[in-house]
Image (cartoon, grey):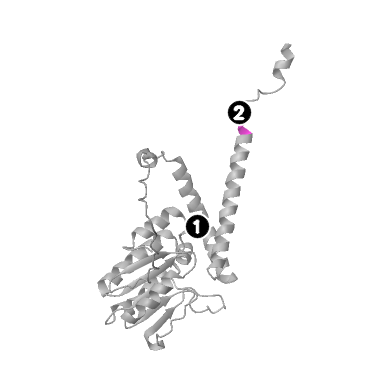
Amino acid sequence: MNASDEGDGPPPDAEPPADEEYARAYAAGYEDGARNALREVVQHAARGHTPQEIRMLVEGRLVRLPEEVETKRRALLAPPRRTAFGSLLRPAPAAPARPWTVPVATAAPRRLAAGQSLLVREQRPAKALEVLRTSAAAFPRVTIVSLHPPDLPGVPADRRTEISPRGAPGPDGAPGRIGLSELGGRLKAPTEAPGGTLVYLDVLEYYATEEGPETTIRFATWLVGVVRASGSALVVSFDSRSVDPQWSSRLERAFPALG
């Protein structure tokens, strides 16, 4: 081998150039971002949102995108946490052998009592609706906060109040919106009425996009406190996959019970 052959190219195990590493990282990040955005739109559609509502949710998310990117950047630059490998390496206890199997009965829907709050994690409102219908008879009134109010057989109209986050259309015909502060005011009367109210809510993801996660968490914490103090009850249907896991876990900590 002569000297000219030594410069024909990098050795097989050489690291790729810095520009190529940057391009790979950028392409991978772009793919993850596009995948997450499309998945979020699909989840909004699966929850029954109309095209106009999906547009409002996406536009609100775009406004807050720089803040989310900065939060992600800081998280990536933070020092890594130490992992407790002991719990990962410890073998799971063996299940005792059973000569025969006992069929497991299906659990009945949970009934909420006065002062209780429940956050149900589900892709579409289902289990929370069962809790709502099972618990409605124990309260003199029911308050529903939803873009698509569910049916409540057996609950007459005079015991039922529906609040839509959309509100009344504006003078120009544009869709209105009820902010969290106004929603809190509307929930004040039924919760403080004698006997309280059973509140059903399935729009926390909507408000997290419209008003931000911090404001939504503060509202949820406030509402849990109001329910506890007034003898009301609260059941929330929430799709944790449609929001950032970090603030989703913070929201879950605001509720004394999860489903």
Residue 193, position as x, y percentages in the image:
29, 81
Q: Residue at x 37, y 45 (%)?
A: 92
Q: Which structural element holds mark 1?
A: loop
Image vertical order of residue 82 relative to residue 99, above or below: above
Vertical side of 233 occupied by 154: above or below: below
Instruction: Report which residue position mark 2 lands on.
Output: 15
Q: Which residue does the numbered mark 1 point to in the structure image?
A: 64
Q: Residues within 10 Å of mark 1 (few under 14, many from 20)?
A: some
Q: Which of the two labelled residues, at mark 1 and mark 2, occupies the earlier sequence position? A: 2
Q: Secondary structure at mark 2?
A: loop
Quadrant in the picture for residue 221: bottom left
Image coords of residue 105 (percent x, y): 39, 67
Give the residue type that dot 1 points to.
Arg
Residue name at image x 36 percent, y 42 percent: 87
Is 254 or 150 nearer to us in this picture? 150
Q: Residue flagged by tag 2: what amino acid is it?
A: Glu
Q: Residues in magenta?
A: 14-19
* Secondary structure character of the magenta stretch overall: loop
Front of the two marks 1 and 2: 2
